[in-house]
Image (cartoon, helix red, strand yellow):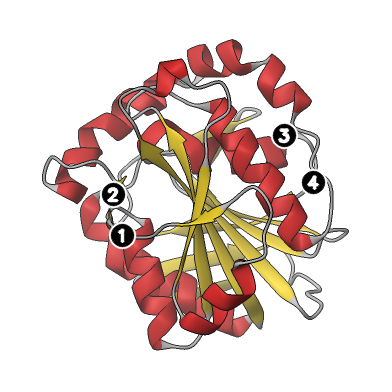
Amino acid sequence: MINVEEGFEIEENYVPDIRKPAYMIVGIPDAGLVGEIATEYMIGKGLVQEYGQVFSRKYLPPILHVDDGVAKSPLRLYYGKDINVIVLHSWTALPVNSAYPLARFITDYAIRYGISSIISITGLPIPNRLDIDKPSAYWIANSKDLASSLSGLDNVQKFGQGYISGPYAPILYETAKKNIGNFAIVVESFLDIPDPEASAVALEIVGKYLGFTIDTSALLQEAEEIRSRIKGLMEQTKRELPTYSSGKPMTYA
């Protein structure tokens, strides 16, 4: 089945049997690859399974991700029946011109499947990251009502004042326009070094919010191996970061 929305073609192998309330998690490479590592970990641990691919001649780079010998779109859809979550995961850095069209696509796709809330995961680059064992986490909501519901979450604080740029900022904007709940989990991180430890913090928060446990012990144990394996993606992402934020970090106070 192929559908076309906002300049993106969606090829779905089946229609996920989404139950209410339903959630979507977005993992796109940006600072520290925090969101990308988090959603890739969910995929690798079998919490979600692939059911679709997203193509765009206009907005995606001419790159295919090879998975077990098969070339596929780098932007793919996954569904976890047991946890009732859709994951949109990108295996490659995305160009800045795709940010708003992709945000509109994500919003419309969420409406189609009756998604209650979209959860974005990103990094907050800090200069003393090497000195911190467990980074702090913050949330940024796209509405006052959602902000009120997040105020009781453990181990995560409200992001008081500052800026968010990069691929997650347009998602907050577009979802707010169409009254879809969206919040970003923002974890202190490196800017241009893959940060699995920050991803583990984010996944713990996601699990608590959604009501299931994500064992992140393997993610922490394999941190150095992960950093080595995806250093090419980090280099690719570093080239895109300045175009999003005019030289500033993706999120900053």
Q: Which mark is residue 161?
A: 1
The residue under the point 33% across, 62% down is: 169
Label 4 element class: loop
Helix, strand or loop for disc 2: loop
State if disc 2 and disc 1 touch (CB < 8 Å).
Answer: yes
Q: Residues within 10 Å of mark 2 (few under 14, many from 20)?
A: few
Instruction: Look at 27% across and 55% down and name the residue there.
Output: 165
Q: Which residue is mark 4?
A: 47
Q: Type of residue at label 3?
A: Gly
* 104 in relation to 88, above or below: below
Residue receiving disc 3: 44
The answer to whether marks 3 and 1 mark residues whose Cβ atoms lie closer than 8 Å is: no
Judge by depth and name the residue closer to the eye, 105 or 201.
Answer: 201
In three-dimensional space, the C-alpha distance between marks 4 and 2, rounded to whole angstroms, equals 33 Å
Q: Give the Cα separation between the discs numbered 1 and 2.
A: 6 Å
Q: Would you identify the image quadrant in which residue 161 lies?
A: bottom left
- Within 10 Å of disc 4 (Cα), the crowding (few <14, some 14-19, many 20+) is some
